[in-house]
Image (tube, coloured by chain):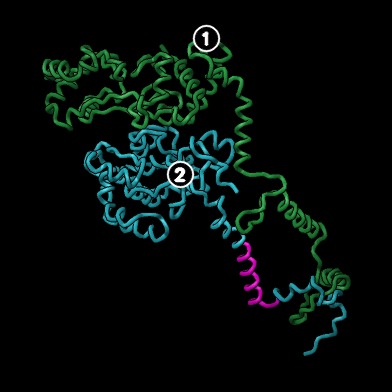
Amino acid sequence: MTHPAQPSRSPKPSSTLWQKHQVFEKNSIILVIGILVAISIGGLVEVLPLFYLKSTIEKVDGIRPLSPLELSGRNIYLREGCYNCHSQMIRPLRDEVERYGHYSLAAESMYDHPFQWGSKRTGPDLARVGAKYSDDWHRDHLRNPRSVVPASIMPGYPWLEQTPLDIAHIGDNMAVLAVEGVPYTPEMVAAAISDAKTQGSADDAATPAFAGRYPKAINRDLGGNVGRLTEADALIAYLQLLGTQVDFKLYDDKANIR
Amino acid sequence: MQDNAAKPANDKKASVGTTGHEWDGIQELNTPLPRWWLWTLYATIIWAFAYWIAYPAIPLVSSFTKGALGWSSREAVVADVRDLQTLRGPMTAKIEATSLAEIESTPELLSFARAQGAAAFAVNCSTCHGAGAQGAKGYPNLNDDDWLWGGTVDAIHLTLQHGIRWDADKDTRASMMPAFGRDGILKPNEISATADYVRSLSDLPVEKGADLALGATVFAANCAACHGEKGEGLQDVGAPKLNDKIWLYGSDKALLIERMTLGGGGVMPAWSARLDAPTVKSLAVYVHTLGGGQ
C-alpha cells in the first residue's frame, strides 16, 4: 500500500540540533542509555563529593562506635520502627536549634549503618534526647507513653522490659560493622557480651576496661531488675547516648570548613 | 459532526505539519510546545546558572565553589540565633545580672522570666512534670506546697542547675533510699506493717489486723532518720513528707511496699548542662510562681 505524498512534513529540516532528540525518542535502547547517563552524572556530582570533601567528612572529637549494649538497643530501635515517627537530625534552622540544641553533625552518625536521620516527625526529633530525661522516665514512657505525656499518640512497648535481651550474636554484628568501616577492634568484638552485661549493671570491677573501650558510656543499672538485661535496658542505653558524644563547648564549627 | 471535527485538524496540519509518522492513515501533528511553557523552561535554566554563581554549588577536587553571596547554612543559623539573642539581649542581660528575689519583685522582669520559663518548661520539663506542672506518678506536682528539695526560689534554682541524683553533675542533689526489700534489710512482714503504719500517719485506713506497733518500731529504726519521726520529711535529703496526704508514687499499700522494696528515688537531669544560665533562672522563677513557691 502506498501512502499519499506528504506535502505537510515538518517544515523544519530534521537535521537541525533541535531535532536530534528524535534519535532518543525513536530508539528505546538509546533512550535507556541516555537516561542512565543523565542520572549517573547527577548522582556522581551530588553524591561523590560527599565522600572526599573535607567539610563533609569532618573529624569531630568524642565520637566513638556504639557499645554492644547501645548497639543492641539500636537494633531494637530499628526492629520496632522508631524511625517511622522519629527523626535523628536537627537541621541548621533557628527554631530547631532553639528547641532541640546544636544542629546535628555528619560525624555524629558516621558509624550508623544505616543512619537514622529520617524526615518524618510524628514524634519529636531524638538526635539529642540523650541525658534529657531519666532512665525511669524512659521506662515509664516506653511502657505506656500516656502515663507521662497524656496527649501522646505513641504506642506503648510494654514487652520490651519483659523480654530478656538477646546478645548472643552482638559480637558478630560488631564484626560485620567493622567490615563496613566502624572501628571495632577484635578485642572489642571478643569482649562484646561481657561488655554488654557490664554496662547494664553497676559492676565496678569490670568498669575500667569497659570505660577504656567506650569512653563516657553510661554504666549503671538501667532498670529495677538487677542482674537481668532486658530489651528496654538496651534501648534506654542507646537513647541516653544520642547526641551526647560531642562536647559543643569545645566544638569549633569553623575548624573544618574549607 | 465528523466533518466539523476533522476540519480544524486539517487546518492545523497545514500550519504545523506532521512528524512524518503514519500508521494506517493516522498521522501525528508536530505541534510546537506552547511558547509560555518554553520560555518558562528557558527562564529556569538561566535561574539555575545564576544560582550556581550565587550559592555554593559545584564540587571541586578538594573544595567546592562557595558562591558569590558567601552563604553557608551553618553561618546562616548562627546569624539567626545571634539576631534572636540580640532581640532578647537587654532583658536576658538583666535576668542574668539580677538576683532571683529581685526578678520576682520587678514586674517587667517577672513577666519576661515567666514567659521564657513557660516556653522552656513546655519543651524540657512538661514531659515528666506535665504540661500544667501537675506531675505524674514518680514525678512531683510543682503547683502544690509540698517540696522534696525545698520550695524557695533559690532551692528550686539549685535543683534545676544540678539536677537530682544526676551522676554527671558533681553538685547534684543526692540521696538514696535503701532497697529494704530487695536487699533483704527488712522482712516482708516488717515492710507490710511499716506500709500500714505510714498510711496511718496521714489518717488513711489500714488493713484489718495491721501490726502498727511493729510498723512504728521499724519506722523509727529505719525510716525516721530521713523521713522524720512523725513522717514530716527532710528537705536536706529530699525525703518526702509522709504525713500530708500528698503522695509521689501513690498511697496504695501495694505502692508503698513497692517503694520500700526497691528504694532509690527519682532522677532529674542537671539543666545547666543543657540550657543557658538565664533560661535556668527564668525556669526557677516560673516554677516558683506557679502557686506553691515558698
In the image: residue B102, left or right of residue B9 = left
**Chain letter, colour green in render:** B
Q: Residues within 10 Å of mark 1 (few under 14, many from 20)?
A: few
Residue name at image x 54 percent, y 15 percent: B110
Numbered circle sitting on residue B143 = none
Q: Position of residue A71 (x, y in %)?
A: 36, 50
Which region of the structure is painted magenta? A26-42
Question: Distance from label 1 to label 2 (Cα)?
Answer: 45 Å
Numbered circle sitting on residue A61 = 2
Q: Secondary structure at mark 2?
A: loop
Q: Main secondary structure of the magenta part?
A: helix
Residue name at image x 48 percent, y 29 percent: B275
Residue A33 is one of the magenta-drawn residues: yes
- The answer for which chain carries disc 2 is A
Q: Secondary structure at mark 1?
A: helix
**Chain letter, colour cyan in render:** A
- The tally of labels here is 2
Q: Position of residue A99 (x, y in %)?
A: 52, 34
Are the residues flagged by discs 1 and 2 from a single subunit? no
- The answer for which chain carries disc 1 is B
User: Quick check: A258 above or below B87?
Assistant: below
Residue of label 1: B105
Residue A109 is one of the magenta-drawn residues: no
Residue name at image x 46 percent, y 38 percent: A247
Q: Is residue B125 visible?
A: no
- The three-letter amino acid code for the residue at tag 2 is Asp
State the image quarter where residue A240 is shown.
top left
